[in-house]
């Protein structure tokens, strides 16, 4: 809620009248105490993602969404399933409940296409987040909030070039996730060296470590390992150590452990897409649309990343990562 208070106080300093400023401060105070800062109807918004169980990334997304929901007087519902068909079933269940707004991910777009169209046809505004920016408008969503995965991958490739790397392996931990494929495609697009894809089973972390370790042992020319999620970075570090490889490990996404390992020099860099912002802005933008028909970016994707995080940046962001908002 500190972000709410800061925003309201900022507006006050920008030139609000004494009365308006006082009211703004009162609204911010209510929000900070876990009460709504608005008096709009108590709409129900649902978020349905492709997350598996126990994924810290999506805990951060939810934290942002829930804090925006408190501010905006929203009843927030959440469901998830890593399987595309089951995710679509959860979306259908939310449609049947006649929710007032939907937030969905399109990691498995083929499974989601029809049900997103059903929501739009039923008059339920839909915003996509995190994955599927290239399919969002086609499927009938109002807009997309997240990072462009190809652009994020290109940012990684450029960083690898700057670090003088020559051969990289891109570790994909969820087969069928188009966003992951796009990340590795982006790396290949901008990296001047060679990139090889390595597919692993993300739900089996010992297996992930073994696969990376075997790859590094079989090819000593690999000097960079790129993981596509923060939980996999420490595992890749262990794999490199066990393989006796000097390959640098870099990763997409940020969490407390990644921030710690960046500071310790165990990781080269991370690419942060700000999951907290994805959740917060998705709820807030749905509220703005319901209340005032506002739409940021004219319907074009609203980017939350990529932000390259190095050892120099990690110390500042570590505090936020530990509290679960970065």
Image (tube, rainbow, N blue to C red):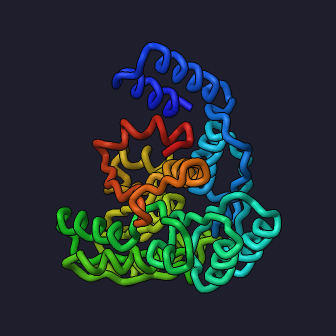
In the rendered image, residue 258, in percent from the top left (x then y), is placed at 45, 51
Residue drawn 48% across and 46% down?
326
187 lies above or below 67: below
Q: Give the residue drawn at x 37%, y 36%.
A: 316
Near-viewer residue (48 or 300): 300
Q: Residue 6, how many percent across, how many down? A: 45, 28
Q: Nearer the viewer, residue 246 or 102?
A: 102
From the image, which quarter does the N terminus lie in?
A: top right
277 relative position to 88: left or right: left
Q: Could you tell me which residue is drawn at 27 percent across and 78 percent down? A: 167
Q: Quadrant of residue 147?
A: bottom left
Q: Position of residue 103 (x, y in %)?
A: 62, 62
**Can residue 50 be seen here?**
yes
Residue 200 shows in the view: no
Q: What residue is at 23 percent from the left and 75 percent from the top? A: 190
Q: Position of residue 99 (x, y in %)?
A: 75, 60
Residue that extends furthest to the top in the rendered view of this protein = 18
Total labels drawn: 0
**Left or right: where 12 falls relative to 69:** left
Question: Is 283 placed left or right of 143 in the picture?
Answer: right
């Amino acid at each position: 809620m500190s972000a709410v208070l800061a925003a309201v106080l900022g507006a006050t300093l920008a030139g609000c009248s004494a009365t308006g400023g006082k009211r703004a401060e009162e609204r911010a105070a209510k929000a900070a105490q876990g009460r709504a800062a608005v008096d709009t109807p108590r709409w129900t918004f649902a978020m349905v993602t492709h997350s598996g169980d126990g994924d810290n990334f999506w805990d951060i997304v939810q934290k942002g969404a829930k804090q925006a929901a408190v501010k905006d007087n929203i009843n927030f519902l959440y469901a998830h399933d890593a399987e595309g068909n089951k995710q679509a079933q959860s979306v259908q269940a939310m449609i049947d409940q006649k929710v007032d707004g939907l937030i969905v991910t399109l990691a498995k777009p083929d499974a989601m296409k029809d049900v997103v169209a059903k929501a739009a046809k039923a008059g339920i505004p839909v915003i996509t987040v995190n994955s599927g920016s290239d399919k969002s408008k086609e499927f009938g969503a109002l807009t997309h909030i997240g990072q462009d995965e190809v652009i994020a991958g290109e940012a990684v490739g450029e960083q690898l070039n700057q670090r003088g790397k020559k051969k990289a392996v891109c570790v994909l931990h969820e087969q069928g996730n188009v966003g992951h494929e796009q990340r590795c495609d982006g790396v290949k697009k901008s990296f001047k060296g060679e990139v090889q894809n390595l597919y692993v089973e993300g739900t089996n972390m010992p297996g992930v470590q073994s696969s990376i370790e075997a790859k590094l042992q079989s090819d000593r020319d690999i000097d960079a390992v790129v993981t596509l999620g923060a939980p996999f970075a420490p595992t890749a570090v262990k794999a490199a150590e066990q393989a006796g490889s000097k390959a640098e490990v870099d990763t997409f996404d940020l969490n407390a452990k990644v921030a710690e390992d960046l500071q310790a020099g165990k990781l080269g860099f991370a690419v942060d897409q700000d999951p907290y912002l994805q959740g917060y802005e998705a709820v807030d933008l749905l509220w703005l649309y319901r209340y005032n028909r506002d739409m940021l970016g004219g319907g074009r994707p609203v980017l939350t990343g990529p932000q390259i995080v190095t050892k120099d940046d990690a110390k500042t962001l570590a505090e936020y990562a530990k509290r679960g908002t970065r």
